[in-house]
Amino acid sequence: MIYLNLLILSISINNLQSWALERGLLQNRFELEYMQFSWHFLSMPFLYMFLIHYLNLTDKFFNILKFAIPGFLLLVAAQVSFVLSSSGTDSKENLDYIYEVYASLEEFFSMITSLSIFIYSMYILNKKENLFQKTLSFDNLKWLNTFFILSSIGYLFWIVALVVKINLNFTGFLFSYYPLRILTTVLIYWLGYQGLRQLRIVKERKKIRASLLIDLNGEFNLDTVDLNTKKTSLESNQLERQSEQFNDIDNFIKSKKKYLLSKYTLQDLSNDTQLGSSTLSSVINNIAKKSFTDYLNEMRIESAKNLLLDPDYSEYTITSVGLESGFNSKSTFYTVFKKHTGHTPVEYKNLSLAMLKS
């Protein structure tokens, strides 16, 4: 949370500084009208630090703030030195022009540095998934990917604004930064909301999972059911043989709570039981009279019902309950839950609690 808050703070201060300069609030306040510090220089380092901490990768990637903070302070010192040495040596019009040229060079350097860190962070998120599988079991990180997409648009706006600034010879260019300011303002609110929401959901999911006594990485504390004995059964009646196989499959899935795995497929079940996928599909369809997905979803719905009515989780979000019940998204949870119960999770919870009180 510290790095997420610092990321939001750096963007906010940068926008506030731009607004104050545009409104002329800093004019004739010593040399403050020429002090346009590159707060955006710190945004991506804070994002990077948030990312590696959130993904539990701090021991695998270096602390970039060791270079970013001294770099920012060096930019501040260089700018202060430039302004103090230049002020009073020329007309205000010429000084304005000289400063904007200098500020643009500093901005270009900041953009290149920031963009490099941004690309590297995006590389970690999309190409190093094998390093943060545990985090992925609690968060699919779609919200972070969305943030990177929006930020990519922001960089495009930034590049265009800087090009316009140069083409206008560093005068009358402020309008070109308006789209960037609007987007970054939206990002501030969106990132704050999503960050707090996701951190709450992850915390709740960890508590729910701990209470269910499961490990979705595959280390289960229950004895393995041996299905190979059924595979070689000499029963002559196929339906009877499939019924016995289904009982073992059903016991295996329920005892191991495999239905709580959102990406558990027939192939995964085949690997676990040493039975072919086609055999498993045939057994489940013939005996349970439903598809493998519907078969798992029924168990997931029952798990969700229990969690929704458990007083220990009364203050938990519906999203946390749905995801820990084995659904891969909130929308899927709502759709399947209503299909099976005729009510949304919220409606079911309210109706059930009302019936218990009456």
Image (tube, rainbow, N blue to C red):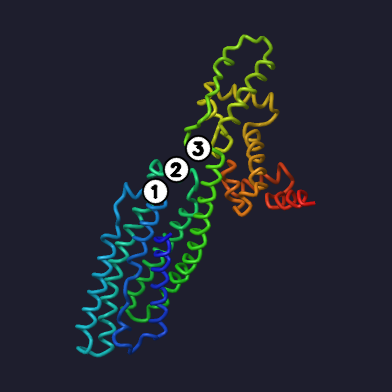
Check contact, mark 1 vs mark 2: CB within 8 A.
yes
Quarter containing the N terminus: bottom left
Q: Secondary structure at mark 1?
A: loop
Q: Earlier in the sequence, mark 3 or mark 2?
A: 2
Query: Image height check: is 346 above or below 244?
Result: below
Distance from the alpha carbon under mark 1 to that under mark 3: 17 Å
Pointer 3 residue: 216
Q: Position of residue 22 (x, y in %)?
A: 40, 82
Give whichever of 303, 39 is nearer the camera: 303
Badge 2 amino acid: Lys
- SS category of the residue bearing label 3: loop
Secondary structure of residue under mark 2:
helix
- Which residue bears the numbered disc 1? 56
Query: Which one is earlier in the sequence, the residue at label 1 or at label 2?
Result: 1
Judge whether 223 appears above or below 235 on screen: below
Callout 3 amino acid: Leu
